[in-house]
Image (cartoon, rainbow, N blue to C red):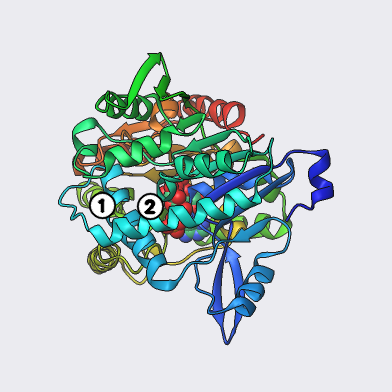
């Protein structure tokens, strides 16, 4: 972590999120780290070289005692990431329970959610624990940047601790998910606590105008506590919170550099050779119901059935990284996907033809880059999605291939990438099948024109600071 000498020279950016850039696993009494998956870590990974910062969060495991915590902290690396260790049941009720069984589905417009007091209590407690640790780490002048739905109460809990300790630090909060329409949000009995928790920040950031507007509407609902000052400013007592839209992006240069790596060049040639005479399509998603994987497979199946002449000419490579595997909805989804994959392969695969390759695991960055590069089409089929960085990553790896992006209207990315992509409604199997047909049969001139528009967005507006 930063030393006091370092601190005398520069203020620090303190990033706080539930997920750290590294996740730990316990293996025979020691700890192994691996890069965490997910858009939040990808979006913030560009910060590493450029700023004086530290990153506080939950390392994904329990440490039984102080010695284990020290070992776990060493596995995270001494300098940048600091683990906030939680007791196992508390972590489960906060992460699997309130965050991922109640809040995540609400933010993504799912229905039939059961509110549970014990999960809410754990959520509150974990936010309190984070507030204690962050307040202790912070010095006056540091900038504190809190991320995502696991920590919506943190701005207000932290603000009061900092005040009590006489520390002055600006607090920013960024939500990396959609913020839903008023009626959906009101389904949560604790929505007022969550909204007012976030409003203790100086700046509250969203990925799109729509999410920001929805949040402002949720605030108006509590006119007993807050007042709309002017556009995008909300007053709560003597505090003013500014709302903003901040486009989250990737570091395209990291991809273009990796594409020059001889291993990747070789791998691209290998993959091309393996699938010669086929149009390769790629899907890369966390295995999450919000990504519309079931709908993607059904749309692809429809496309294969409707276009028999193309069956031997396409292959969809779908990579699905396991995610939140303790949560029932995710376990059910995995089963459903495996059944569908079996059905499609059973009907359409032959010894000399396999139109679907399904990989249920995380893949290395080099393999990911090679796959993005060889694919002529990328399918992003989110039912709802804060932004979706896969869309940008794919375009960053395309170059002369001028790949076609088939993009759900309900991904945040659609607000910025509509011009070049083929948009479709993610609940319509027909629309997806037709979009795939359009992508596979598109002529070179049109591919180029669309690609250039997408490329402008990715290179000009999403480069990390
Ligand atoms: P989310 O924020 O919901 O996780 P995004 O599309 O914004 O979705 O970000 C997902 C990130 O995770 C991307 O950077 C993507 O490259 C990475 N990713 C997704 N699936 C895999 C996988 N199977 N292997 C490696 N990385 C993956
Ligand atoms: C989304 C969320 C992030 C989260 C990521 C991976 O991007 O917005 O906060 O880190 O998914 O999910 P996980 O549950 O593994 O942290």
Q: What residue lies at 59% left-to-right and 56% top-to-bottom? A: 21
Q: In this rendering, is residue 324 above or below 157?
A: below
- Residue 408 appears in the rendering: yes
Mark 1, secondary structure of its residue: helix
Quadrant the N terminus occupies: bottom right
Q: Position of residue 75 (x, y in %)?
A: 66, 70
* In this picture, residue 180 sits left or right of residue 285: left
Is label 1's Cβ within 8 Å of ligand 1? no
The answer to which of 364 and 204 lies nearer the viewer is 204
Is label 2's Cβ within 8 Å of ligand 1? no
Mark 2, secondary structure of its residue: strand
- Do the CB atoms of the residues marked 1 and 2 lie less than 8 Å apart? yes
**What residue sits right under mark 1 in the picture?**
304
**What residue sits right under mark 2 in the picture?**
314
Q: Where is residue 330 in the image (x, y as percent from the top left)?
A: 30, 63
The answer to which of 297 and 152 lies nearer the viewer is 152
Q: How crowded is mark 2: few (under 14 residues within 10 Å), some or many (20 or more)?
A: some
Quadrant the C terminus occupies: top right
* In this picture, residue 455 sits left or right of residue 350: right
Q: In this rendering, is residue 449 above or below 107?
A: above
Q: How crowded is mark 1: few (under 14 residues within 10 Å), some or many (20 or more)?
A: many
Q: Position of residue 212 (x, y in %)?
A: 38, 27
* In this picture, residue 38 sits left or right of residue 193: right
- Residue 276 appears in the rendering: no
* In this picture, residue 71 sits left or right of residue 331: right
Q: Where is residue 56 in the image (x, y as percent from the top left)?
A: 59, 54
**Residue 196, quarter of the rendered image:** top left
The answer to which of 422 and 364 lies nearer the viewer is 364
- If you read the primary sequence from the N terminus, does the residue marked by circle 1 or circle 2 appear first? 1
Q: In this rendering, is residue 459 above or below 330?
A: above
């Amino acid at each position: 972590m930063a030393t006091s000498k370092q601190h005398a020279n520069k203020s620090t950016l303190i990033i706080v999120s539930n997920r750290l850039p590294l996740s730990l696993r316990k293996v025979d009494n020691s700890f192994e780290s691996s890069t965490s998956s997910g858009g939040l870590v990808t979006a913030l990974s560009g910060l590493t070289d450029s700023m004086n910062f530290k990153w506080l969060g939950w390392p994904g495991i329990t440490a039984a005692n102080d010695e284990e915590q020290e070992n776990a902290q060493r596995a995270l690396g001494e300098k940048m990431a600091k683990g906030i260790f939680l007791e196992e049941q508390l972590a489960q009720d906060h992460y699997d329970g309130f965050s991922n069984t109640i809040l995540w589905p609400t933010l993504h417009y799912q229905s039939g959610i059961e509110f549970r007091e014990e999960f809410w209590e754990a959520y509150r407690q974990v936010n309190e624990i984070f507030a204690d640790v962050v307040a202790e780490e912070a010095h006056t002048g540091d900038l504190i940047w809190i991320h995502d739905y696991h920590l919506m109460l943190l701005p207000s809990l932290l603000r009061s601790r900092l005040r009590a300790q006489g520390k002055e630090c600006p607090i920013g909060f960024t939500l990396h998910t959609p913020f839903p329409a008023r009626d959906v949000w009101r389904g949560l009995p604790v929505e007022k606590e969550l909204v007012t928790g976030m409003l203790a920040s100086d700046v509250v950031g969203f990925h799109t105008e729509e999410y920001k507007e929805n949040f402002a509407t949720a605030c108006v609902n509590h006119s007993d506590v807050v007042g709309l000052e002017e556009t995008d400013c909300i007053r709560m007592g003597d505090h003013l919170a500014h709302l903003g839209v901040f486009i989250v992006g990737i570091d395209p240069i990291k991809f273009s550099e990796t594409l020059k790596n001889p291993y990747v060049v070789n791998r691209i040639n290998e993959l091309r050779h393996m699938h010669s005479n086929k149009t390769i399509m790629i899907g890369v998603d966390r295995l999450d119901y919000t990504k519309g994987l079931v709908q993607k497979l059904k749309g692809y199946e429809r496309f294969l059935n409707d276009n028999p002449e193309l069956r031997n000419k396409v292959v969809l490579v779908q990579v699905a990284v396991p995610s939140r595997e303790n949560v029932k909805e995710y376990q059910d989804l995995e089963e459903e996907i495996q059944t569908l994959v079996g059905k499609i392969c059973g009907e359409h695969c032959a010894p000399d033809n396999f139109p679907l390759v399904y990989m249920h695991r995380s893949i290395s960055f080099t393999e990911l880059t090679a796959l993005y590069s060889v694919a002529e089409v990328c399918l992003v089929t989110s039912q709802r999605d804060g932004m979706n960085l896969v869309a940008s990553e794919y375009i960053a790896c395309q170059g002369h291939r001028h790949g076609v992006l088939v993009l759900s209207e309900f991904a945040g990315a659609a607000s910025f990438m509509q011009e070049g992509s083929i948009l479709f409604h993610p609940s319509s199997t027909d629309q997806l099948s037709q979009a795939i047909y359009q992508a596979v049969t598109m002529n070179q001139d049109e591919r180029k024109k669309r690609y250039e528009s997408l490329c402008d967005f990715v290179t000009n507006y999403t480069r990390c600071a």
